Amino acid sequence: MASSTDILTTIAVIFSFGIVLAVLAHRFLGRYLPMPHRLNVPPFKTGVILLRDKPVRTVPTGTYWLSPHSTILTCDTRSTPLKLAPEEFLTADNFGLRISLTGHYRITDPTAFVTTSSNATGAFFLELTQSLRESTQEFSGHNPAFARTALPDRIQQLVAPRAARLGITVDSLEIAEYVPLGWLKSATPQTPVPPPTTQGFGPN
């Protein structure tokens, strides 16, 4: 009569053998048939499960078994620093300014971030630049100190709803560079001066 140790050993061997067969079968059949698959969401990221290119739900960090037609897109939801390179803008009264921005933003709606645009980060920076241009045009060059302190709040007010459509929230904005360039001289059309009339010499 077999001892309890032999029975447990036999069960463990059969169980291990069954697991190996199941893994091999899954890999073999997965080449020819749609099979469930396992995907991982790395730390500090949020995953968006897509079923046939349609968002289903968001999932936190972890490992997930998905149906054959599902996949996961991931995005980092931590605070991210931003820097907008210096560009030249005009105020409402044609005063030139060179301005650059720094700040932080976060992805707060992963589904919108991965589905609204093929490059949501690039679209966000375009919206930020446009908001800076629009806000600068609302101020006068006569009071640059006021404009410098009020600009970040106005830019954030303009860009917030635009960024939200991309799944992004702007946490902070600051003016990194603010260089007055002076007044832009408008070109005044000049009246053309006719050439002098040349009179010929000789008898009248």
Image (cartoon, rainbow, N blue to C red):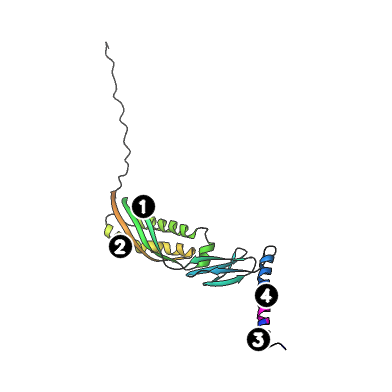
Q: Which residue is mark 3?
A: 5
- Amino acid type shown at disc 3: Thr
Estimate how packed mark 2 is, as few (under 14), some (14 to 19) or many (20 or more) residues with alpha carbons within 10 Å: few
Say whether disc 2 or disc 4 marks the residue closer to the N-terminus.
4
Please say if the residues under marks 2 and 1 sit with CB atoms less than 8 Å apart.
no
Cα separation between marks 3 and 1: 78 Å
Residue at x 27%, y 59% (from the top left corner): 145
Q: Which residue is mark 1?
A: 87
- Amino acid type shown at disc 2: Thr
Estimate how packed mark 4 is, as few (under 14), some (14 to 19) or many (20 or more) residues with alpha carbons within 10 Å: few
Residue 140 in sight from this viewpoint: no
- Amino acid type shown at disc 4: Phe
Q: Which residue is mark 4?
A: 17
Residue 162 in sight from this viewpoint: yes
Q: Quadrant location of the C terminus?
A: top left
Whole-percent x, y for residue 10 in the image: 68, 81
Query: SS of the residue at dot 2?
Result: helix
**Magenta span dominant secondary structure:** helix
Q: Which residues are magenta?
A: 10-15
